[in-house]
Image (cartoon, helix red, strand yellow):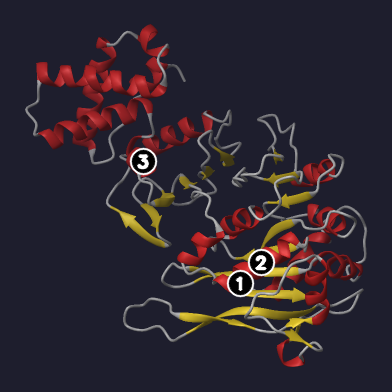
Amino acid sequence: MSLRARIAAPEEGGAGREDGHLVAVYRAKLLEEIDLAEMSSLAAAERRVRLERVLGHIISREGPVLSSSERSQLIRRVVDEALGLGVLEPLLADASITEIMVNGPDSIFVERAGRVEQLPLRFASNEQLMQTIERIVSTVNRRVDESNPMVDARLPTGERVNVIIPPLALTGPTLTIRRFPRAYTLPELIGLGSLDEQMLMLLAAFVRARFNVIVSGGTGTGKTTLLNALSGLIPSQERIITIEDSAELQLQQEHVIRLESRPPNVEGKGQITIRDLVRNSLRMRPDRIIVGEVRGGETLDMLQAMSTGHDGSLATVHANAAEDALMRLQTLGSMSEVQIPFEALKDQINSAVDVVVQLARHGDGSRKVAEIALLVSHGREQFRIVPVSRFVPRPVGPDRVVHGHFEHLPLPRPVAEKLYVAGEPLPPSFSVAEAIDVLHTRQAIG
């Protein structure tokens, strides 16, 4: 969309029709005053400053008489409508907001500190919301209309955007913007109460000893945050390849190759899937492969890579328990076009997966490592896992804050020996079991 079209677009403000009319009037006056050729040559930040200055002169010259706060708000809204995303601009500028959910023009929710709240904001109409959506998707060369009513994309600034519009969305155009938090280190996650120091030492030993780790959890439990933190433990001299649907990982090592899948274009062509990238990564001489999330047939390729020389790899999967994560890997692996018996996938998983780190999100919005479990089954036998650490919550009190403690259990001797051979000492809180304690071993349905 051209600069003139963006400023002159007939949108209404989010606070009501009267305010929307005022915004439209001053947007038109702004268009008359500015030099579009000069504006087009400016960077985005300079363009905003110039528009705010020009609009301030117009308001001073022509009125209306406004208080300082009202004047600032009007200037911001006019410029936001002209160059940005209207009522969403202040939300995107708020670093405390991690998710913006627009459920039609009259309903805007945000997530702060793990809690969802509704805001007293609205779009004036479906048309204004659709114009905002079209502006967003146009920045990534996508379109949204009745023939293509769903869009999932990553903005140049890093946010993940999902759009679904009528007739699929019955409440009106629906927009979800997920902002990724900064990369946290494992010590910082200890400070947040997500895990304790003994668990950090154990996870660090697993990563350095090249255990294959699956991070499991539901939506919003912090899988990517933990995966990113764990990846920081990989030695800097190793060649790491990350594979994601939307690039979220922020690895700090020098030898990192970042791959991102690509959806089909408007003609339905050119799609590059996660599976394509996993297969290609095996030809790139990786020391470690990190898959942001396995959700389809690429799971089989990932499992085969983990069990055939690419140990020390990491991936995430959506599941509500460690047992569920293994069953889901089996189901996802069966979605490959390779005709492999369902039972044979147990062999692949038992050979490939060493550790499952299960995350949970609690009622107070806190995210914690619910369990660290080791997969100790072999061949095609049913999955057997040994929990070695878990969070034990106490009953929720009047403050509605989740309290509890992390419990540490003995490590199976073969695991302790593998860590010993790799030169990794056991954390002090973890003992070694002479044999797998059946009381601490759980068996999933095979």
Q: Is residue 178 above or below residue 62?
A: below
Residue, disc 3: 93
Identified by mark 3, the residue type is Ala
Mark 2 or 3, nearer chain start: 3
Mark 3 and mark 1: Cα distance apart in space: 35 Å
The residue that appears at 33% across and 29% down in the rendered structure is 81
Residue, disc 2: 203
Name the residue furthest bottom. 439
Q: Is residue 236 left or right of residue 152?
A: right
The residue that appears at 63% across and 52% down in the rendered structure is 232
Q: Is residue 336 left or right of residue 101?
A: right
Q: Which mark is residue 199?
A: 1
Corner quadrant of residue 327? bottom right
Query: Do the residues under discs 2 and 1 have CB atoms within 8 angstroms?
Result: yes
Identified by mark 2, the residue type is Leu
Corner quadrant of residue 224? bottom right
Identified by mark 1, the residue type is Met
In the rendering, at what x and y percent does residue 299 appear?
79, 56
